[in-house]
Image: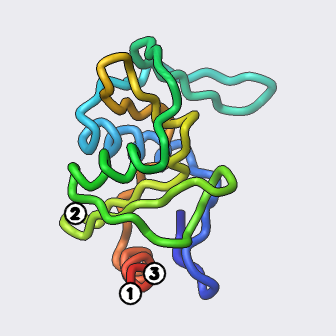
Amino acid sequence: MIATPAGPTLTHALPAEYLHRLKVSNRVFDDTAGLEGATREEGALVIITSQPTIVGEGATEQEMIAFFAALRFCLIPGFSAGYRGALSFYRDLDQVAVFDAHPANFLKDRNGMILPIDGVVVECDDALAAQVEGLLR
């Protein structure tokens, strides 16, 4: 995710950016997704990650909003990045945004716990933070 004149735009992450997102996601969600290694396939770099097997059903929009509110994130109303209609959230405390929040990326286990799978977690630079905060007004 980058700041552009048109507003925040989701971009493909470079390998270092992807690994940084993984680290921020681990910190924000207190999860154990990890880096297993890297290899090349058909000339392209492939990053291999792992996380525990998660069994559950897709979280509803209201369940995701409540989950993020408990982590002190605000819903970015009307802004979607990634999957069409996905929710987006922002926490000004540490300038972290989460995009692509939809039922396939946030599951609810049998105990009702919301488990992040593959949201786009971004530590915003000042320019991106300003644009995201502008969407909250």
Residue highlighted by disc 2: 94
Q: Earlier in the sequence, mark 2 or mark 3?
A: 2
Provide the secondary structure element on which disc 1 rests: loop
Q: Which mark is residue 19?
A: none
Q: Position of residue 75 (x, y in %)?
A: 39, 64
Picture colour scheme: rainbow
Residue highlighted by disc 1: 137
Image vertical order of residue 135 relative to residue 11, above or below: below
* Amino acid on which disc 2 is placed: Asp
* Amino acid on which disc 3 is placed: Leu
Residue highlighted by disc 3: 135
Query: Which tag is nearer the camera, tag 1 or tag 2?
Result: 1
Q: Position of residue 57 (x, y in %)?
A: 51, 24
Image vertical order of residue 123 relative to residue 30, above or below: below
Assess whether mark 1 and mark 3 are in contact (beta carbons under 8 angstroms): yes
User: Which residue: 30% across, 36% down?
Assistant: 26
Marks 1 and 2, how far apart at CA: 18 Å
Relative to 47, is 34 on the left or the right? left
Q: Is disc 1 surrounded by few (<14), some (14 to 19) or many (20+) residues within 10 Å? A: few
User: Which residue: 37% across, 25% down?
Assistant: 33
Viewer-closest of 100 and 38: 100
Res. 132 image quadrant: bottom left
Marks 2 and 3, how far apart at CA: 17 Å
Q: Position of residue 21 (x, y in %)?
A: 41, 46
Assess whether mark 3 and mark 2 are in contact (beta carbons under 8 angstroms): no
Provide the secondary structure element on which disc 2 rests: loop
Q: Earlier in the sequence, mark 1 or mark 2?
A: 2
Viewer-closest of 42 and 18: 18
